[in-house]
Image (tube, grey):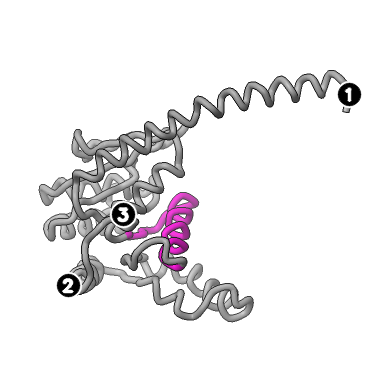
Amino acid sequence: MNDSLKNLKDRDWTETKAHSSWQIFKIMAEFVEGFETLAKIGPCISIFGSARTREGNPYYELACEVASRLAQDGFGIISGGGPGIMEAANKGAQKAKGKSVGLNISLPHEQYPNTYIDYDKSVNFDYFFVRKVMFAKYSQGFIMMPGGFGTMDEFFEVATLIQTKKMTETPLVLVGKEYWSGLLEWIDAVMMKKESNIHPEDLNLLKVFDTADEVVDYFRVFYTTNRLRPNF
């Protein structure tokens, strides 16, 4: 390595270490704000899905209906705080006069707090991993509407936590059989049967529904025999 490159790398690494030390306090502050806000709200269900799904889309309207009916049953509704399916979830919660929570993330595009979040239940994050801890700790159920990379990230994060028993048994629901069928077929045929990377019982962690009735009924039955409590 030539001297000029070595000096540049040494200087950059020293600056990175100094920045990392201060970054710890920013991360801690996000955890504290999230814990203090969500611990006051009570049992909640998180609804995930694409930020690009607009009002009038069948999945937008379905997310709104599911959120509204679960809010009527007494659950708070948590979304990622942005537009699309997230907006639909918060809209449904407010329509039912339920608790409407938004965990917003700062992004360079397409993410802004929607107008249906309760003013005292909106939390902003810079770090995805801190935000995901809040979803995982305070949600008594997870509903995955059709979405993109972010929804897939949240889906597999929750599935892993439940599979490894780092989280108590918690409903994990996929809505939209047509949308999810290709992924589920691959998980079954390749991940499980061909490569043996998961056990058959792992697929039992997932419930797939098409209608609001199915989703709401599943949560009602589940919580007739299971306690409502933080997941860890």
State the quadrant of the C terminus.
bottom left
Q: Earlier in the sequence, mark 3 or mark 1?
A: 1
Labels 3 & 1 near each other (Cβ < 8 A) = no
Observer-side mark, 3 or 1, equals: 1
Question: In screen coordinates, is 70 left or right of 186?
Answer: left
Q: Is residue 146 magenta?
A: yes
The front one of 39 and 145 is 39
Q: Which residue is mark 2?
A: 224
Q: Secondary structure at mark 3?
A: strand
Amino acid type of the residue that numbered disc 2 sits on in the rendered structure = Thr
Q: Is residue 156 magenta?
A: yes
Q: Which residue is mark 3?
A: 47
Q: Earlier in the sequence, mark 2 or mark 3?
A: 3
Q: Secondary structure at mark 2?
A: helix
The single residue placed furthest to the right in the displayed view is 2
Q: Position of residue 210 (x, y in %)?
A: 30, 69
> What is the CA distance from the residue labelled 2 to the residue labelled 3?
21 Å
Q: Which residue is mark 1?
A: 2
Which residues are the magenta region?
A: 142-163
Q: Quadrant of residue 34?
A: top left
Q: Main secondary structure of the magenta part?
A: helix
Give the crowd class for mark 2: few <14, some 14-19, many >=20 residues within 10 Å.
few
Q: Residue at x 54, y 27 (%)?
A: 21
